[in-house]
Amino acid sequence: MKKLILTAITVFLMAAWTKAQYKADFANWVIESNVKTPKIQVIKFYNAQQELIYEEEVKGFKVNINREKVRTALNAILDEVLQKDKAIQKENLVMARLKKN
C-alpha cells in the first residue's frame, strides 16, 4: 500500500513539474536593476518568440512598476515596438513616456 501511495504522489509531482515548464508565447517587458546602482535600470522588450527587440537604459529615477500608469506606459511602448517593421534604433521611448507620468 505504501508503494502505491508513493508512486501516485511521485507521478502527480512529475506531472505538475512538467506542466510548470511551458514556454511563454506572448510579448513582454523586463526591468533589470542592480543593488549598487538602483537609479540605473535597463528595460528590455521581448517579442512572442522571446527575442530581444528593444532595450533602453533609464537613468536618474527608479521605475516603479507598482504604479498602474507606469505599467500602462510600458505596455503601450511594447505595442508600439512590436508594430515597427525594422530594427529600432536607440530612441528614448521609455524615458520620454515615463517623464510625462
Image (cartoon, helix red, strand yellow):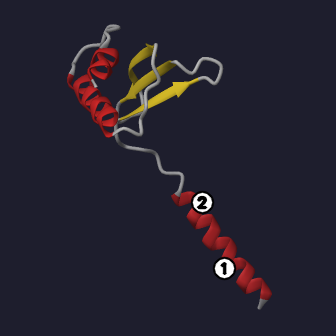
**Residue type, numbered disc 1:** Ala
- 59 up-or-down from 32: above or below: above
Residue 15, position in %: x, y? 57, 66
Q: Residue at x 72, y 85 (%)?
A: 4
Q: Nearer the viewer, residue 31 or 67?
A: 67
Left/right of residue 55 with respect to residue 12 in the rendered view: left
Residue that sits furthest to the bottom in the current view: 1
| Residue density around tag 1, few if under 14, some if 14–19, many if 20 or more, within 10 Å | few
- The quadrant holding residue 16 is bottom right
Q: Position of residue 33 (x, y in %)?
A: 55, 24
- In the displayed structure, 82 sits above or below 5; it is above
Assign a secondary structure to mark 1: helix
* Residue at x 50%, y 20% (from the top left corner): 41
Q: In this figure, which residue is indicated by the disc labeled 1?
A: 8
Q: Nearer the viewer, residue 36 or 6?
A: 36
Residue 65, quarter of the rendered image: top left
**The N terminus appears in which quarter of the rendering?**
bottom right
Identify whether 50 is placed above or below 86. below
Mark 2: give few (<14), some (14-19) or many (20+) Cα within 10 Å.
few
Residue at image mark 2: 17
Q: In the visual, does 26 lie left or right of 42?
A: left
Residue 92 screen position, x and y as percent: 32, 11
Answer with left or right where residue 29 lies relative to residue 1.
Answer: left
